[in-house]
Image (spheres, rainbow, N blue to C red):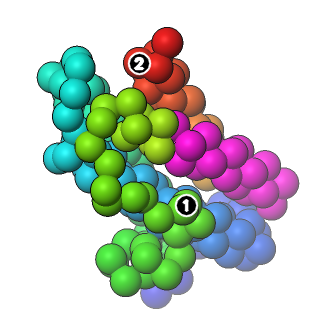
């Protein structure tokens, strides 16, 4: 049974579902990269970095849930399996040979910058298509990614 949202065109709905699923794949891939770093980080300030990575992962998990639920509200299918994420993510593969905290932080900063850029592109696309609510969800995700990037970059000063 199709969901009918007042004031939302079919094009807006389809655009939003596509943009949301793209950002869902990247968010899940980034969350897994953060966990990879969390599990394997070593070095100075270990506990601070280890705990920071847990916080970043929790922030991403919250955004992932909101994004996936919005896909459902729009009568779409949230594509979050490992296979779909692996095939769909636009983020570069996270290296598995890193151990030093600084190396993990640099690698994550690169991915957070890329993720933030793609979130902002999706904000514009969904807003232009006429779905302000989805643009708002993506704006919140962008704000969270920018703040988390700031936390990461602060460890490199």
Is residue 111 visible in this depiction of the protein? yes
Q: Report the residue at 41% width, 18% height from top.
A: 155
**Is residue 92 highlighted in magenta?**
no
Q: Quadrant of residue 54?
A: top left
Q: Is residue 146 left or right of residue 117?
A: left
Q: Nearer the viewer, residue 24 or 68?
A: 24
Secondary structure beneath label 1 = loop
The magenta segment is: 109-129
Numbered badge on residue 155: 2
Q: Would you call the spot at circle 1 few (<14 residues within 10 Å), some (14-19), or many (20 or more)? A: some
Secondary structure beneath label 2 = loop
Q: In the orientation shown, which residue stands out farthest toward the right?
A: 128
Q: Report the residue at 44% width, 26% height from top.
A: 152
Q: Position of residue 53 (x, y in %)?
A: 28, 34
Q: Report the residue at 31% width, 32% height from top.
A: 101
Q: Nearer the viewer, residue 153 or 76?
A: 153
**Please, is residue 135 above or below residue 109 in the view?**
below
Q: Would you call the spot at circle 2 few (<14 residues within 10 Å), some (14-19), or many (20 or more)? A: some
Q: Position of residue 13 (x, y in %)?
A: 66, 69
Q: How many marks?
A: 2
Q: Earlier in the sequence, mark 1 or mark 2?
A: 1
Marks 1 and 2: which is nearer the front?
2
Q: Position of residue 112 (x, y in %)?
A: 53, 42
Numbered badge on residue 91: 1
Q: Is residue 47 left or right of residue 120?
A: left
Q: Is residue 8 left or right of residue 68?
A: right
Q: Nearer the viewer, residue 103 or 87?
A: 103
Q: Quadrant of residue 146?
A: top right
By secondary structure, the bulk of the magenta-drawn segment is best described as helix
**Please, is residue 63 above or below residue 11 in the view?**
above
């Amino acid at each position: 049974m199709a969901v009918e949202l007042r004031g939302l065109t079919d094009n807006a709905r389809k655009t939003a579902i596509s943009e949301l699923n793209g950002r869902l794949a990247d968010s899940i891939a980034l969350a897994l990269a953060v966990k990879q770093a969390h599990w394997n980080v070593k070095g100075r300030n270990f506990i601070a970095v280890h705990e920071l990575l847990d916080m970043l992962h929790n922030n991403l998990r919250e955004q992932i849930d909101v994004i996936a639920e919005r896909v459902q509200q729009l009568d779409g299918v949230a594509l979050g399996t490992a296979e779909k994420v692996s095939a769909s993510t636009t983020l570069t593969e996270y290296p598995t040979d890193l151990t030093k905290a600084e190396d993990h932080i640099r690698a994550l900063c690169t991915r957070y910058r890329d993720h933030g850029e793609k979130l902002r592109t999706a904000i514009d696309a969904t807003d232009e298509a006429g779905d302000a609510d989805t643009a708002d969800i993506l704006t919140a995700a962008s704000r969270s990614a920018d703040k988390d990037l700031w936390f990461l970059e602060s460890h490199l000063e």
